C-alpha cells in the first residue's frame, strides 16, 4: 500500500460491524433486521449516534432514509453521496449493506482526520428497506429518492399482515411528507456505494477490489395458485385439483426458463412458497409463490420472465387450477457512470491495489440512484462468494482496503 494521509481505522470499523450485527431478531451468527421493526429502529439509532459523534449533520426523510452530511466549502454545490442499507433478510449475514454504511462513515471519518477539505459536501446515506422482505419490493428508499417509483404508491404497499407501509412508517416515527422524499436531479454530483461482491470472482482471482460497470436487471413475480383442497383420504387422485402439485411444476418451469436462455447471467429463483392450509391430511387448496428473475442484460431477462408467465398459464389450464400472476417489479439494468468508474480505478492505483471491472448480479440501491445521478460501486471479496446466509464473511483487511479506496474516490469526486 502506497503512503497516504488517509488512514482507515479497520479495528474500530470491525467493532462497529460486530455491534450492529448484534442488533438483530435472529440468533447469532445469523442476522435478521426487517424494515420498521424494533431491531431496524435500534440499528438506525446506533448509526445516528455514531454519525453525530463524527460531527455530521443528521436528518431523516418521510420514509426513514437517513442522511449524514459533512458540509463542504461550497455548500450550495451538488454533494457527493455514499452509503448503502442496514436492513437484512431473515437469517442472513452481517456484511451485506452494513459494509457500505459503516464503511462509508469510516471513509468520512478518515478523510476528516487526514485534514482533507472537501469543496463539495460529502454525505452518508442509509437507505430505508433495500431488501424486499416486508413489503415485497426491494429498494423502497432509493426508488422514492430517485423517483423510480412514486413515494405515494410505495406508501400503499401492504405487508403479510395487511398493514400499509404508510401506517407502519408513521407508527415507527416517520411522519414527514412523502412528496418531499424525491431528490432534485442536482442534489448529488455523484453517488458511490461500497458493498461485498455477493459472488465468488474477486476471491477466486485474488483481486482485492471490484469496480462495478453495470447492475443486473431485477424482476419479481407473485403467483397465486388456487385448487379445490379437500380431505387427504376422501378425495381420490383423479378428482383432485392439488395447488401444490401445480406449484411444483411452476417451480421447475422457473428453473428451466433461466437455463433456456443459454445466457450465462440469466438466473431465476422461487424463494417463497406458502402452502394453505398447511395440514398433512388436507390437500393444498392455495399456494403463493414469489419468484425472482434477473440478468445483466434486459432481453434474456424478459425472455425468461415471459416463459414463466406462459408456464403458469399452461399448468393452470392443464390442472384446472385458478392462477393469478402479479408482476411486483421488472426494472431495467443500470450502467455505472464512466467518471465514477475512473475515479475508483484511479483510487485503486493510488493505493497500489489491483482492481477488476465487473457487473453486479445482485441489485443494490445504486441501481435506482443511477436513474438520477452519476453512480458507481466498489466491491470487496466475500468468503466463497457467500451472501444472504449467516456464514457470510469479509475480512477486516478486505473491508479496510475497500474503505480506503472509497475514501480516495470520494476525495477525488469532492474536489472536481
Ligand atoms: O437481492 C439482491 O440482489 C439484494 O441483495 N437485495
Ligand atoms: Mn441483500
Ligand atoms: Mn445489499
Image (tube, grey):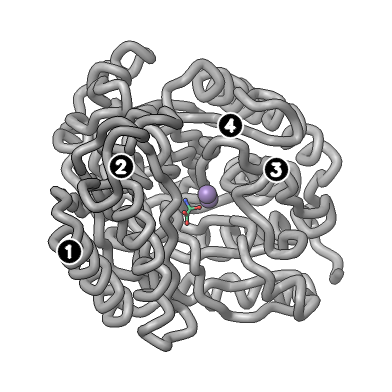
User: Could you tell me if residue 101 is visible in this image?
Assistant: yes
Q: CA distance from mark 3 to mark 1?
A: 40 Å
Q: CA distance from mark 2 to mark 3?
A: 28 Å
User: Could you tell me if residue 76 is visible in this image?
Assistant: no
Question: Circles 2 and 1: CB distance less than 8 Å?
Answer: no
Q: Which residue is mark 2?
A: 287
Which comes before the other along the chain, label 2 or label 3? 2
Q: Identify the residue shown where x is 27% and y is 81%.
A: 299
What x and y, as percent, mark residue 338? 44, 78
Which comes before the other along the chain, label 2 or label 1? 2
Along the viewing direction, whichever of 43 and 330 lies nearer the viewer: 330
Q: CA distance from mark 1 to mark 4?
A: 40 Å
Q: Identify the residue shown where x is 60% and y is 23%.
A: 25
Question: Circles 1 and 4: CB distance less than 8 Å?
Answer: no
What x and y, as percent, mark residue 30? 69, 35
Which comes before the other along the chain, label 4 or label 3? 4
Along the viewing direction, whichever of 88 and 161 lies nearer the viewer: 161
Task: Give the mark toward the camera: 2 or 1.
Answer: 1
Task: Give the mark toward the camera: 2 or 3.
Answer: 2
- The N terminus lies in which quarter of the figure? bottom right
> Is 96 placed left or right of 6 in the picture?
left
SS state under label 4: strand
Query: Which image quarter: residue 394?
Result: bottom right
> Is 233 placed left or right of 299 in the picture?
right
Question: Circles 3 and 1: CB distance less than 8 Å?
Answer: no
Task: Give the mark toward the camera: 3 or 1.
Answer: 1
Which comes before the other along the chain, label 1 or label 4? 4
In this figure, what is the number of numbered marks?
4
Q: Which residue is mark 3?
A: 390
What x and y, as percent, mark residue 108? 63, 44
Q: Identify the residue shown where x is 43% and y is 80%.
A: 259
Q: Which residue is mark 1?
A: 318
Amino acid at each position: 500500500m502506497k503512503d497516504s494521509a488517509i488512514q482507515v481505522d479497520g479495528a474500530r470499523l470491525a467493532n462497529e460491524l460486530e455491534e450492529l450485527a448484534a442488533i438483530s431478531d435472529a440468533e447469532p451468527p445469523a442476522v435478521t433486521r426487517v424494515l420498521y421493526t424494533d431491531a431496524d429502529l435500534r440499528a438506525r439509532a446506533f448509526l445516528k449516534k455514531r454519525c453525530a459523534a463524527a460531527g455530521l449533520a443528521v436528518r431523516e426523510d418521510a420514509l426513514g432514509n437517513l442522511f449524514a452530511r459533512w458540509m463542504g466549502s461550497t455548500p450550495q454545490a451538488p454533494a457527493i453521496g455514499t452509503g448503502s442499507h442496514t436492513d437484512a433478510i431473515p437469517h442472513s449475514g452481517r456484511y451485506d449493506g452494513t459494509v457500505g454504511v459503516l464503511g462509508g462513515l469510516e471513509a468520512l471519518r478518515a478523510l476528516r482526520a487526514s485534514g482533507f477539505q472537501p469543496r463539495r459536501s460529502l454525505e452518508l446515506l442509509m437507505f430505508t428497506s433495500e431488501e424486499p422482505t416486508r413489503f415485497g419490493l426491494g429498494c423502497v428508499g432509493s426508488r422514492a429518492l430517485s423517483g423510480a417509483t412514486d413515494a405515494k404508491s410505495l406508501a400503499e404497499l401492504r405487508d403479510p399482515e395487511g398493514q400499509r407501509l404508510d401506517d407502519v412508517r408513521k407508527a415507527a416515527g416517520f411522519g414527514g411528507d412523502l412528496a418531499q422524499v424525491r431528490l432534485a436531479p442536482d442534489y448529488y454530483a455523484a453517488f458511490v456505494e461500497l458493498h461485498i461482491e455477493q459472488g465468488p470472482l474477486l476471491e477466486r482471482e485474488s483481486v482485492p477490489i471490484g469496480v462495478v460497470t453495470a447492475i443486473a436487471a431485477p424482476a419479481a413475480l407473485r403467483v397465486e395458485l388456487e385448487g379445490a383442497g379437500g380431505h387427504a383420504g376422501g378425495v381420490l387422485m383423479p378428482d383432485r385439483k392439488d395447488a401444490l402439485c401445480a406449484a411444483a411444476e411452476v417451480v421447475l418451469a422457473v428453473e428451466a426458463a433461466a437455463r433456456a436462455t443459454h445466457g450465462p447471467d440469466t438466473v431465476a429463483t422461487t424463494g417463497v412458497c406458502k402452502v394453505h392450509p398447511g395440514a398433512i391430511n388436507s390437500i393444498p387448496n392455495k399456494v403463493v409463490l414469489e419468484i425472482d428473475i434477473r440478468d445483466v442484460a434486459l432481453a434474456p431477462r424478459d425472455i425468461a420472465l415471459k416463459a414463466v408467465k406462459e408456464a403458469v398459464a399452461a399448468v393452470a389450464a392443464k390442472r384446472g387450477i385458478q392462477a393469478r400472476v402479479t408482476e411486483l417489479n421488472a426494472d431495467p439494468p443500470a450502467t455505472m457512470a464512466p467518471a465514477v468508474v475512473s475515479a475508483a480505478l484511479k483510487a485503486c492505483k493510488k493505493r497500489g491495489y489491483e482492481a477488476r471491472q465487473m457487473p453486479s448480479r445482485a441489485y443494490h440501491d445504486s441501481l435506482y440512484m443511477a436513474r438520477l445521478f452519476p453512480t458507481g460501486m466498489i466491491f470487496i471479496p466475500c468468503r466463497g462468494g457467500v451472501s444472504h446466509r449467516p456464514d457470510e464473511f469479509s475480512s477486516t483487511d478486505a473491508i479496510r482496503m475497500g474503505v480506503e479506496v472509497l475514501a480516495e474516490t470520494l476525495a477525488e469526486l469532492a474536489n472536481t
